[in-house]
Amino acid sequence: MIKGTRVIPIALAVCVASSIGLSPAVQAKNKAVEVLKYLNPVPEKNLYLNKSQDRVIKKKGFKTLEVEGAKPVENKELGFFAIVDLNKINDTETIKSVLQKPDVNGISVLLPWRLLEPVEGETNFKPIDSLLELCKEANKTLILRVSTCGVDDNAKSDTPDWVFQDPTSRSIVYVGTDGNEHQMPIFWDPNYLAKWSNLINELGETYDKNPNIHSIGITGGGVLGGTNVIPDFVASVKQTIGAEIKAKPEKGKEGTTDSSAPADGFAEKPADATSEKPANQAENSDDKTAAASTDSATEVTTEKADAGKTEGDKPATTDASKTASNDSASKSTDSDDDDKGAGKEAKREVTRILEKQFGMTQRQLIEHWKYVADLFPKAFTVTRLNFDVSPPTLNRKGQDSLDEIADYLVYRYGQRIYVTRHGVKDGHHGFDDYRLLLKFHPDTLTGYRMTNDFAVKDMPKLVKAAGEDGISFCEIPIDVINNADETTKTAMHDIRQRMGYQIVSKEVSLPKDLKAGDPLKASFTFLNLGAASALKPSRQLDKDIASSYKVQLELRDTNGKPIARLLHTPETPTNAWSSGKPIQWAEELKTPAQLTPGKYEVYLSLVDSDTKRKLRFLNGIGTGEPQALFEAPVGSIQVTN
């Protein structure tokens, strides 16, 4: 069995070693300072919290704006993604078909680790490559997650056999949704973490900066690529305790209960007690983004001191006992008194099992999850990452667990972190249970991931929730998309209309004449019809910096050749462009003194100055329906001596 007193120091040391981004095989070594930290974990009460969450505890209302003729704008971060199950990843025709749908922006897959590394050190990334290729052909993107547990019921585990064959490895046996026993690694086991970090580093070396990847899931510590540490933790305990209550002999009579099942619903598994079945192969694909042309045009940047910065988060302490409300999955009422009693006892048993069986408190689980999550931003230094918001263990919502991990990730890595609400089963789901969104909205991109048994009839109810939550993407089972009735199609359309940022240029005023070298005085008016803002990925570690795209005016000569680009960060950074009112500002833009006299056409664009990527927006200047463009003509200027 697991020796709780030894798990804590060993686990942390591995997390630290495997989070520093080493490409060769990782050998975990203890660091005294870190071991001491884990021998003295943060107490259950008076734990770290970011009190700034409390400033916006009420949901931010979504205020709609209407522009006649406006249609949803497509950009890499936004849209619907078809969830392709493991048994369909080789179905090329079905995947191609769904990628051809104009309202689908890409696909989402969850692949088992054993499929990608059947032999230690010998990776098989063909499934990912095939899927990326399909996405590239369709000019769409891929959401990729890798699972260690729960995806494939046809195998003993999503984790390869060779991980468990190490005689010192630790694992858990649990009963899956198919009623059979399955196996998963314990995510603080040093042997597992060293091997897992090797895979993540190789994935990062291979796919970081790939333009056809929407995001990479932060996985490795829980079930189905999520954060839930133990499969059906409370449900397993509740089922066992419920059986014991019902089997309890009447007073004065003797009886027996079936003791074949472990009292906690799962048991530690010896290292050599696994079997692995071959997995399916997969196909893969990629997407295209627009970038500014590379030529000899002069580029001039106009910036204000400290533009776009926000105040850093301030740590605070609060009572961990005030957790957020339970997820709807655990809100269901019990059918009889025995069952209710079992449920209450199960929740108490959860804490006892963590401490007795694993030598872990809830606090320590959260700290370990931070180190597992830290592997990904170090391996993927540019690609956006996707963090699942499901509690690491059931019935421990919000501030003392899930929100804290997300707080840690978003503060350290900025807007490269997406936050996804997994397990959306019906119209009652959303981010209602999570304070984290309330703090970071609109500074964190968010999305939904629906379950395969999503109640399709509830799709219209999600329209309001999607607006309030400010989601930028939504992962939907491929069968729901392919079999959508008119009600579902209407709801999807309504969600898509407000999904993410939907930027409209309304007015740009320019001078008619400009002397070479003089500042160009311009004013701008934009609208955002969407429920989220345009967030440029921030790559500055440990700095809470508001990230904004730059507004660019490009001057072209009579032959259409770019001569100068004038860039600046808008007075209100794009990450704060909220729906409900126009965004207006004026700016004096520097111009090159050597600008040749003559007439120049001026084109407007929104640019990531790091990657040269341009955002697609609606050009609402002039008459007629707004057109989706990467760069819009906004007038002309006569340059004089």
Image (cartoon, helix red, strand yellow):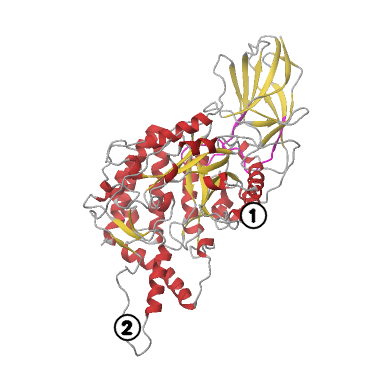
Q: Nearer the viewer, residue 406 or 31?
A: 406
Residue 255 numbered mark, or none: 2
> What kind of secondary structure does the magenta stretch mostly adopt?
loop
> In the image, what residue occupies the spot 68% across and 32% down?
618
Q: Nearer the viewer, mark 2 or mark 1?
A: 2
Q: Which mark is residue 461?
A: 1
Residue type, mark 1 in image: Lys
Q: Position of residue 22 (x, y in %)?
A: 32, 37
Q: Identify the amino acid type marked 2.
A: Gly
The span picked out in magenta is 524-551
Position above or below: 209 against 38: above
Residue, far left: 167
Is residue 31 visible to the viewer in this orientation of the structure? no
Give the image quarter of residue 70: top right
CB-based contact (under 8 Å), mark 2 and mark 1: no
The quarter of the rendered structure image containing the C terminus is top right
Neighbor class of circle 2 (other Cα within 10 Å; few <14, some 14-19, many 20+) is: few
Local SS, label 2: loop
Among all residues in the image, which is located at the extreme right? Answer: 623
- Magenta region includes residue 399: no
Residue farthest toward the bottom in the current orientation of the protein? 252
**Which quadrant: the N terminus?**
bottom left
**Whole-percent x, y for residue 219 in the image:** 41, 47
